[in-house]
Amino acid sequence: MFRVLWLKSKIENITMFALADCNNFYVSCERAFNPKLEDRPVVVLSNNDGCIIARSEEAKSIGIGMGNPFFQVRDIIDRYDVQVFSSNYTLYGDMSTRVMSILSEFTPEIEVYSIDEAFMNFNHLKVPEMESTAREIRRKVKQWTGIPVSIGIAATKTLAKLANRTAKKNPASGGVFLLDSDEKIKASLARTETGDIWGIGRHLAKRLQREGVYTAQDLAKADDVEIKKILGVCGLRTAMELRGVSCIKLEDAPAPRKSVCCSRSFGRDVSTLDDLSEAISLYTADAAERLRHEKLAAGTMTVFLDTGRFRKKCPYYFNSVSKTMAVPSSNTGELAGHAIKLIQNIYREKFIYKKAGIIFTDLSATAAVQLDLFSENPANFAKSCMLSETVDSINRRFGDGSVFYANEGVGKSWAMLRGRCSPHYTTKWDEIPEAG
DNA sequence: TCTGGGGTCCTAGGACCC
DNA sequence: TCTGGGGTCCTAGGACCC
């Protein structure tokens, strides 16, 4: 069988994809630096300590669900002495980089798909070597970073996702699962509900159910015209992939970014324009810094305000407003000035705001920005760019928030809650763990 | 009392043009 | 008075992903 599949892959040029996915990634990052968390229930919270966004296996087994609001599972957490962490994205981002660089050693082509997942091209391997290579990757990532990964291997990305689920859920697999025969694929499809297929979400799974399509196998067998009617072109592509026809290729170069967004919920009720202006200034500074880091400038900015959907007793208000700049910019001072004017436009008194944000779109490479003949003097333009870059380099060297624009406010009493954050083990000199 | 944030793509409908 | 058809662009809303 292996031989046949290998030959087939050479003759028909079939790609084999491996999907490496870190297990309970954020929890594993916390554990990597805190061995006392091993074998205990651990969860990580979203920004503002709002929801559960990562759970250890122990936490899953006592009934804590993904996305559960923290306050709703508080009694389970107390009863089982669950260890709770605010999210520490600086740590997770850094650990992700380390994991991805190890994965890169094993394949000529890798697509970093998310902070904790990467697709790898396994075509350079013979089928019998794929499994042993995957086990070697697992061993090395665990040894070098402390992060456990699971690896699924198959002829399409969608099937590799399925294989990965099996690798994760089935302890007998030892963290690696290869979908290398028709029988295995068939069995996998039969036991996968449509909602668990990559690309089929909650809403579409329900619609499929109404049509009598319950499993991946049902979907693979369904009529193309019907599939397209219910799921659209993407759904049809998914069905093809389940049948083993590869339609989604490996994207080894990241697509150019189309937007940069920064929005956060407030740590307390906010109703004054002053507080909102401070918050939106900070968010603008944060998003603009990311623009500069990627050498991009924004042509359009959108600012929005939201009272939130959960409090039924308070009147609801959401509004957003956009501005197109004469010259694309990534300059914090200039962008924050616009942002404050925009928020004044949509601000209404007597509402209790929960959230605000900014989105930059129409992005272009800084090097290609055309100056406006009438409004911008090249010397000023260069100066303002230099100022922002200097702020960035000071903050990189001395830590975020070392220098900031005064309109971001000093007290920041509205700032998000983050009461249970672990140290920045890998990115701040004074928080490096010490071996005792 | 307390419910995240950051992205992408597709589709349908309207406006507009020739 | 009769009143086509094809194409493009934009936008809002809906769906998905992690």
Image: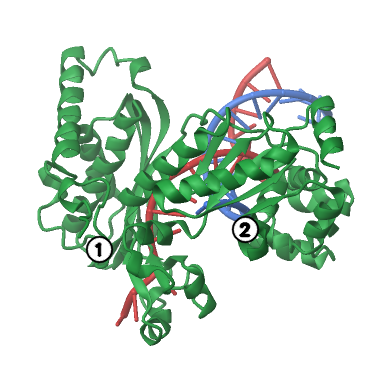
Chain colours: A green, B red, C blue
Residue marked by disc 1: A349
Viewer-closest of A239 and A34: A34
The quadrant in which residue A207 appears is bottom right
Q: Is residue A304 left or right of residue A106?
A: left
Task: Look at 27% across and 36% down and name the residue there.
Answer: A289
User: Residue A422: x percent and y percent?
Assistant: 27, 61
Letter of the chain that mark 2 sits on in the rendering? A
Do marks 2 and 1 both belong to one polypeptide chain?
A: yes
Q: Residue at x 34, y 21 (%)?
A: A366
Q: Residue at x 80, y 27 (%)?
A: A10
Q: Position of residue A31 (x, y in %)?
A: 37, 62
Q: Which residue is mark 2?
A: A174
Secondary structure of the residue carrying numbered label 2: loop
Q: Is residue A163 above or below residue A371?
A: below
Q: Is residue C11 above or below residue A43?
A: above
Distance from Cα at disc 2 to Cα at disc 1: 58 Å
Looking at the picture, which amino acid does disc 2 mark? Answer: Gly
Quadrant showing the C terminus of chain A: bottom left
Number of numbered discs overlaid on the protein picture: 2
Query: Which label was assigned to residue A13?
Result: none
At horizontal 33% and vertical 59% (from top left) the residue drawn is A355
Task: Locate residue A391 relative to residue A188 in the image: left or right.
Answer: left
| Mark closer to the chain start, 2 or 1 | 2
* Quarter of the image that includes the N terminus of chain A: top right
**Nearest to the observer: residue A338 or residue A66:** A66
The answer to whether residue A315 of the structure is visible from this angle is no
Q: Position of residue A146 (x, y in %)?
A: 41, 53
